[in-house]
Each structure stands twice: as structure tokens, then as C-alpha cells.
Amino acid sequence: MATATIIDCHVHPTAAKGGSPTDCADRLLPYADRMGVELMGLSLGPIFVQQPTPEQVEADNDYNAELIERWPDRFFGYTNLNPNYLRHSLAELDRRVAGGPFMGIKLWVAICCDHPNLDPICERAAELDAPILQHTFFRTGGNMPTESSPAHLATLAARHPDVTFIAAHAGLNWERGIRAVAPQPNILVDTCGFDPEMGYTEMAVAWLGSERVVYGSDAAGRSFASQLAKVHGADISDADKRKILGANMRRVLSL
């Protein structure tokens, strides 16, 4: 796989117009090209339900696998899992990551990530050197019952120091989220999932170091440009921006 100038660690095909993988690529790639995004990490899929069945998990992963196999220089993938089905999750992890073409794991809101079911998944992820992209929110009014917060992820990461985790959305309430994950050096944060507010990237770099911040857009739900603005407009060094935009994910993915 070729290296990329800008790697977007967090993209979904769910909101892209068109039903087939080709339709999705036709929608996403021109915007990525316009913004200089060369490689995109796919997760979830067009089914996009909170409690997917094993059959729905496989259908979403099949959809993303086709995108990766047809455009291997533009997409990489995180296998979608529902850890409530632990045996199926471990089988899907072996099928998709050990067997290819996926490089990591995506966990959404099916189960809170500090649940014991995550431990066997993390142990296998460590063996495969597969990063885990975990949705995290500190939602105003309280999270959904099985929705993970950055604090939950910090608990899981402490149990599995050999796994690299990405706290997707930095918890949405990013000031609180950055503080929650700061003590765990194996947790990175991405830039996506909230408006391009001033101060986010500066705080993340100050608290975590630029090596623990990665660019993600949440496209097509959000634009590449609005999330790139959090990096390009930040009061940080050009060297730090280069790490966030691509170098850190090259390290995480062992490209």
C-alpha cells in the first residue's frame, strides 16, 4: 500500500449517495481528491444500525471489503464487530484482519467498551497489531445505555496496554474527553464528529502530544474540509500538523 500525504482515519460509506460500492466511491473520491486526502479508513457500512446481527455485520464488512479491494490505494478498513456476539466477533476478526484486507477494528454503540467481552477481542487485536477505533461520546444529558465514553475507553486501554486505541470524536465534549484519555499513552484521539471549534487541536497536542492526534473527517456525514480546518487552522507547528495529517496513522497502521 502506498504512503499518503493525508490519511483520514475515520470515514463512513453510510451517508454517501448511491447504493453500490462503486456509487459510494464515485461520491467520495472527487471530494477527497479536492482536499488532498489520499487514503481513507472505512468503518461501519450502509446498514448502520446500533445493534447489528451477525448477518448485518458481515454485510457491512462485505460492502467495505469491495471498496478496499477495488481501490486499495484509496481505502483501508476497520472490521465492524458487535461484541455481544463474541464468538462471531472473533471469527470475523480473523476472517477480515488476519485474512485481509482490513487493518483494524471499529466498535460503535452495541456494547460499552469496558465490558469483559472486549477483552478477548483486544487480546486478538494485540496479536494482529490491529488498532481499535472506538466511538466515544460525553453526550449532553447522558450517553445511551451502551454508548462508550472516553472514560470507559481509558479503563479498557489500561487493561490492554499493547493495543492502540483511537478515541473517535475525542468524546464530543472534547475538553472533558482529552482529560479522560490523557493518562493512557495507548489512546489517540481523532479530529472528527463536532464542529471545527477553535482550541481543540491545540489542547489535544498540549495534553497528549502531537503523536497522539490523528485526522479524521467522519465523511460523508461531515465534510473533509471542515475537519481539516481543525488542523490547518490550529496554532501548532507545521511538523505537528504533518504528524496529525498522516505520519501518525502511517505509524499506527505500520505502512
Image: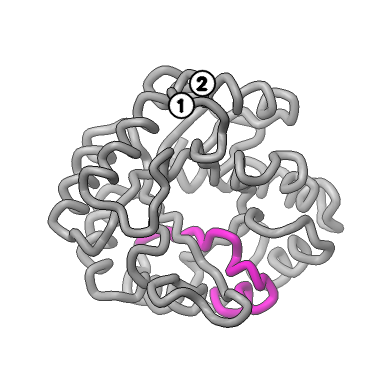
Q: Nearer the viewer, residue 37 or 1?
A: 37
Report the span colored magenta: 163-181
* Residue visible at 73% across and 51% down in the picture: 240
In the visual, does 95 lie left or right of 46? left
Disc marking residue 7: none
In the visual, does 26 lie left or right of 186? right
Toward the left, the furthest residue is 87
* Residue visible at 60% across and 74% down in the picture: 177
Residue 231's place in the image compared with 201, above or below, is above
Can you give x and y, in whole percent of width and height, for residue 145 in the image? 40, 77
**Callout 1–callout 2 Cβ contact below 8 Å:** yes
Residue beneath label 1, please?
A: 19
Can you give x and y, in whole percent of width and height, for residue 169 in the image? 59, 61
Residue 123's place in the image compared with 129, above or below, is below
Disc marking residue 23: 2
The N terminus sits in image quarter:
top left
